[in-house]
Amino acid sequence: MKRVFGLIVILAFASACAVDSLAQSGRVKRTESPKDETKGEVKDEAKDKPQDKARANDDKPLTLKDGIARAIIKSKPNPGYPPEARSYGVRGVVKLRIILGADGKVGDKVEVLEGLPHGVTEEAIKAARRIKFESARKDGRPVSQYVIVFYHFNLY
């Protein structure tokens, strides 16, 4: 139940961030009164323009199935091993799905596909956010790409 609530909170935050970033980029224009007096619905001035729809689809992260030249990871920092996890003997793999953005930055949304307890997953997420890469390309333009990264935690 806690996981479901956590995912709902994360998704709500991510959608709010997406709306804000679209408003800042100029793709969606906010009006003084967001309600339409006749219907009581939120107005979106950009939704009727076909070029804005095409541009909005460009920001969608792609996969290799979409015919892109994959991103090139320049550096993948190693995560720290939390002392508590070491004392409990935690070992295994953390599997994350991240977005390597067209802007050269790792996306805010990190999806944990497989995690480990005692702060290990959080350390892997911190390390994933520091990944340096060259953006994926489609038709010569940089695009965002989904990737899955693995972090192995072993005690020696």
Image (cartoon, rainbow, N blue to C red):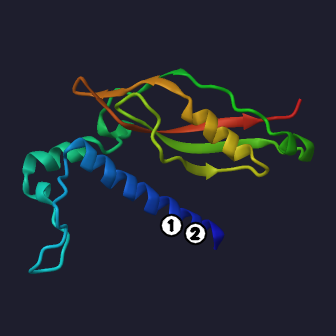
Question: Measured from the top left, where is residue 136 in percent x and y?
Answer: 36, 28
- Residue 155: mark: none
Is residue 31 left or right of 130 when viewed as pictured?
Answer: left
Q: Quadrant of the C terminus?
A: top right
Considering every residue shown, the one lying at the far front of the view is: 32
Q: Between residue 17 and residue 130, name the one nearer to us.
A: 17
Is residue 24 left or right of 2 when viewed as pictured?
Answer: left
Q: From the viewer's perspective, is residue 132 above or below residue 126?
A: above
- Identify the residue at horizontal 75%, vertical 47% (top origin): 119
Considering every residue shown, the one lying at the far top of the view is: 74
Query: SS at mark 1?
Result: helix
Question: Measured from the top left, where is residue 110 in percent x and y?
Answer: 53, 46
Q: From the viewer's perspective, is residue 22 above or below residue 107?
A: below
Q: Between residue 100 and residue 114, name the one nearer to us.
A: 100
Disc 1, disc 2: CB below 8 Å?
yes
Question: Measured from the top left, where is residue 114 in percent x and y?
Answer: 65, 50
- Residue 8: mark: 1
* Quarter of the view holding residue 59: top left
Q: Amino acid at mark 2?
A: Val
- Identify the residue at horizontal 27%, vertical 45% (top origin): 24
Query: SS at mark 2?
Result: helix
Q: Between residue 97 and residue 34, name the one nearer to us.
A: 34
Is residue 97 left or right of 115 when viewed as pictured?
Answer: left
Q: Which residue is labeled 2 in the image?
A: 4
